[in-house]
Amino acid sequence: MNPILNQIGTVFIPVSNIEEARNWYCDILGLPVDGEILFGHLYVLPMNGTGIVLDSKIYSKDNIFKTPPFHLNTNNIEQAYEHMKNKNVELTTDIEHNHWFNFKDLDGNHLMVCKC
């Protein structure tokens, strides 16, 4: 048996300001902003499935994601796109192939929403 599991536990996203990032991510994901910031630089988003940890200690302009390292799921890509537009999120693509679109967070990390 292999001791390394074929599972992703969490993804770390470099952010410059942990409080602002926590508030922004919780807002776009519809999550309460009631979790604790750990050790002054970590915030664990309460996700279903693979976790997301915002981390201001690993942030640098050279360290941001220039391509999406993962995608957030949606059942309705058009509704998700409009939701992000209404939140004034910087969209970097239109809806592509009626299936996905990309956007940037406050620090310029490129992320994706995909219809699954």
Image (spheres, rainbow, N blue to C red):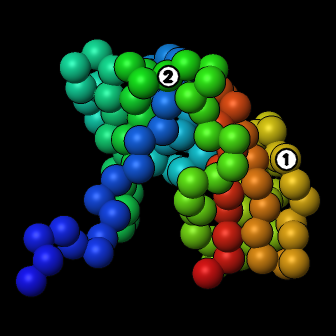
- The reply, left or right, for residue 114 in relation to residue 24 is right
Question: Under tag 1, what secondary structure?
Answer: loop
Note whether residue 72 is visible. yes
Judge depth for marks 2 and 1 and give the one in front.
2
Q: What's the amino acid at mark 1?
A: Thr
Q: Single out the residue that lies furthest toward the front.
A: 2
Quarter of the image where one finds residue 82: bottom right
**Residue nearest the viewer, comparing 13 with 76:** 13
Residue hosting label 2 = 59
**Residue nearest the viewer, comparing 70 with 32:** 70
Residue 11 x %, y %: 41, 50
| Residue 68 disc label | none
Residue hosting label 1 = 92
Note whether residue 105 is visible. no
Residue 62 x %, y %: 62, 24
Point 67% across, 70% down: residue: 114
Point 90% across, 59% down: residue: 94
Residue 84 x %, y %: 75, 50
Q: Where's the N terminus, which quadrant?
A: bottom left
- The reply, left or right, for residue 103 in relation to residue 47 is right
Compared to 114, does 94 lie above or below?
A: above
Point 34% across, 64% down: residue: 8
**Residue nearest the viewer, comparing 67 with 109:** 67
Q: Residues within 10 Å of mark 1 (few under 14, many from 20)?
A: few
Compared to 9, does 96 lie above or below?
A: below
Residue 89 x %, y %: 76, 40
Instruction: Kindly report the distance in space between the C-alpha atoms of the residues bearing marks 2 and 1.
Output: 21 Å
